Image (spheres, rainbow, N blue to C red):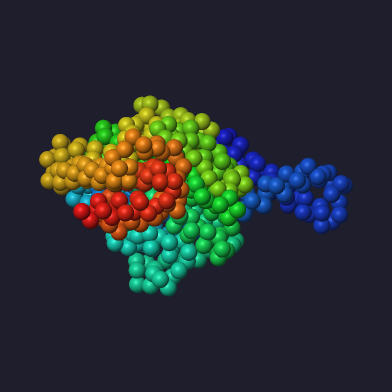
Amino acid sequence: PLRPVQNMAKLLPLVLAAIGYAQAYTAKQSGTEQQHGWDAQTVGFSQQFAPEMLASTTASNHWAVLIAGSAGYGNYRHQADVCHAYQILRRGGIPEEQIIVLMMDDIAHNPENPVPGKVFNKPTEVGVPGVDVYGGCAIDYSGDDVTPYTFTKVLTGDAEALKGVGSGKVLRSTDKDRVFVNFVDHGGVGLIGFPKETMHASELVGALQQMHDASMYKELVFYLEACESGSMFQELPTNIAVYATSAANAHESSWGTYCMPHSMVDGVNLHTCLGDLYSVNWMEDTDTHDGIAETLLTQFETVKRLTTRSHVMAFGNSSFTTEPTADFEGDANPMITMHTPLIFNDNAPQRPSDTPTQTTTTDTNPAITTATPPSAAASTALPSRDAALASAFSRFVATGSDAAAAELISGVQQRQRAKATFDAIVRRVTRDETQQLPSYDGVFHQGCHYAAHKAYVSACGEWTEAALAHSATLARLCAHTHNEHAEIVAAINAECSA
């Protein structure tokens, strides 16, 4: 339920800032600052808070790129996360033409989906309809178009390169605009995944540097959901106005949430994780807070506290983290969406255990349900790399699905093949002295790692989800060879061409 007094308390700083700013300006124009009592402290408060807070009510200078890089029903959660993020941005007033979405789009109408045509990012109790985040989620690039190449061209505004591909939309932002990027998928040390390819940390940072050099943003915020995602930003410059947070540090898994047996929506078991813990935490935080009152730093601290299975990290330029989340995630606040009830709560959601509640909004921009249990923190969570296998097993046991059986068998076989391949590469480089291989401490040499990564793709084929778990092995081999990649490349070529 809404709490008018608390709502007014949230709006009071904005109201006071606006009034103070206007009065200070009028007094200054008439030269009567002291006569009317508008001292330096009052003017300072107004000048500090009013311009940014009032500026955040304009969504025209907001741009966003949302990417789900995986495929297959077992990875349901990634597309659910991205469509939820899309609904948040649209509800926040960011125009559809300024949001660019890349995702495989093979979940909503997947034969394994027990609720065809719909995707949910949060469970609900029996009798409480789930909120379909897929409805209205405008996808610009799908299927084989979801690649690192497309992503890079979208980021760097290269419309010519994407003529005839998907919607052709690219960022057309300027140095007066704020850009929000949200990437959700599998990852590894120095790598993030796409349906059939991968992108290296040096390539990602290179694209961001290119955006900066072309004056494509005033400030950019990047939220990254992937295993070892902290490894992607280790060489992110601090002087290019990019602030990035990651779901995990450089040497740990990220986690799926709302997994079996909590993958129930109105009594239907979807047999898959509905979301990712870090992603669900930032989005549910946004769903239940005023985007003008909450800063980026506050959201980071909240998400870091709630994401208990991995270590949420921050990188880059933190000088603008005192700005409101609305500056990047849209102005989902009472001034913009007067017709949309917002639930403001300073602490954990307070909901009657026997009376589920649900936020409401317009049909075209649905808010996410706040129905009772489980919360993301209390829900069953799984390491991201195990989530697809767990989904296949759950579906096979429950339904005997041939597709689930094939996924399960293939997933196990891929794991075994990847382990055997990397064990053999290690033996070649260390000359069977595998105990000499140093441990991975989260820091790696990007030049050596990149060369080894390219050699692996060339000789062994693209990284599978199973192989990504061994990307840290390349970092360990680089440390073993003192960052000389030639011996590693030779071992990879020899093993995969044998």
Q: Nearer the viewer, residue 327 or 233?
A: 233
Residue at left offset 37%, top offset 67%: 167
Q: Nearer the viewer, residue 159 or 399?
A: 159
User: Residue 41 in the image: x percent, y percent?
Assistant: 78, 42
Q: Is residue 71 visible?
A: no
**268 left or right, relative to 191:** left
Count the marks: how many?
Answer: 0
Q: Nearer the viewer, residue 288 or 477?
A: 477
User: Residue 36 in the image: x percent, y percent?
Assistant: 84, 46
Residue at left offset 34%, top offset 59%: 146
Residue at left offset 53%, top offset 45%: 315
Q: As displayed, is residue 157 above or below residue 396?
A: below
User: Residue 88 in the image: x percent, y percent?
Assistant: 44, 49
Q: Is residue 308 visible?
A: yes
Q: As displayed, is residue 19 above or below residue 261?
A: below
Q: As displayed, is residue 288 above or below residue 339?
A: above
**368 left or right, relative to 416:** right
When asked about the image quadrant of residue 28, the answer is: bottom right
**374 left or right, relative to 15:** left
Residue at left offset 81%, top offset 45%: 40
